Amino acid sequence: MNQDCLSEIGNGMVTGKVGLAWVIRSDADLMHLASEGDFGAFSELLVRHTGRIYDFTHGILGDDEVSLQVVCDACVLAYLYLGYADEALDATTWFHLNTVRALITHLEKRQDPKVQDPKLEGVPVMAAPHGFNGSA
């Protein structure tokens, strides 16, 4: 199989070569395998999705280093909670849900004056809007 063929297949479906045949697995198949403990399947999902979740995170935070840390946190969350993944969710949605969780955790730490991050020294803590008590 030549490189041109690989680029045509390069829609994120090729996961490896077995003998003379290429094994093609969908994200849904990989999610299922990963939820059963196949770390190779989870690694393939990471390869396919971390670029997009980094772009999403960086678009919100605007900082390379902090964005990478949040992406790492999101990937750990995605792995830890694989057993709770709803089969109706696709992998993209699953990674983005965990990315949002990691972003919220990061932003809560940043806004909580009791949590001291040396990188944020001197950055003002945002106060809640007047009359907002945090309850719905």
Image (tube, rainbow, N blue to C red):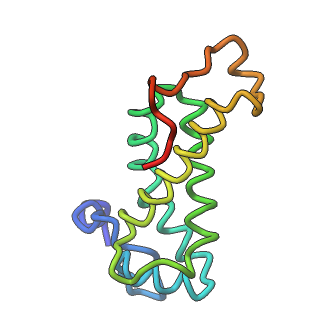
Q: Quadrant of the N terminus?
A: bottom left
Q: Is 110 left, or right, of 10 in this rendering?
A: right
Q: Quadrant of residue 129?
A: top left
Residue 123, given in percent of the width and then of the height, sits at 63, 14
Question: Relative to the observer, which residue lies in front, 99 or 125?
Answer: 125
Q: Is 94 left, or right, of 39 in this rendering?
A: left
Name the residue located 48 percent from the left edge and 88 percent from the top edge.
19
Question: Relative to the observer, which residue lies in front, 128 or 45?
Answer: 128
Q: Is residue 93 above or below residue 83?
A: above
Q: Is residue 29 above or below residue 104?
A: below
Residue 16, given in percent of the width and then of the height, sits at 46, 76
- The residue at the far front in this view is 131
Residue 75, given in percent of the width and then of the height, sits at 57, 58
Name the residue located 75 percent from the left edge and 28 percent from the top edge.
117
Q: Quadrant of residue 48?
A: bottom left
Name the residue located 45 percent from the left edge and 28 percent from the top edge.
131
Q: Is residue 38 above or below residue 56?
A: below
Q: Quadrant of residue 55?
A: top left
Q: Is 79 left, or right, of 58 in this rendering?
A: right
Name the residue located 57 percent from the left edge and 40 percent from the top edge.
68
Q: Is residue 70 above or below residue 47?
A: above
- The residue at the far top in this view is 122
Residue 85, given in percent of the width and then of the height, sits at 48, 77
Question: Relative to the observer, which residue lies in front, 3 or 39?
Answer: 39
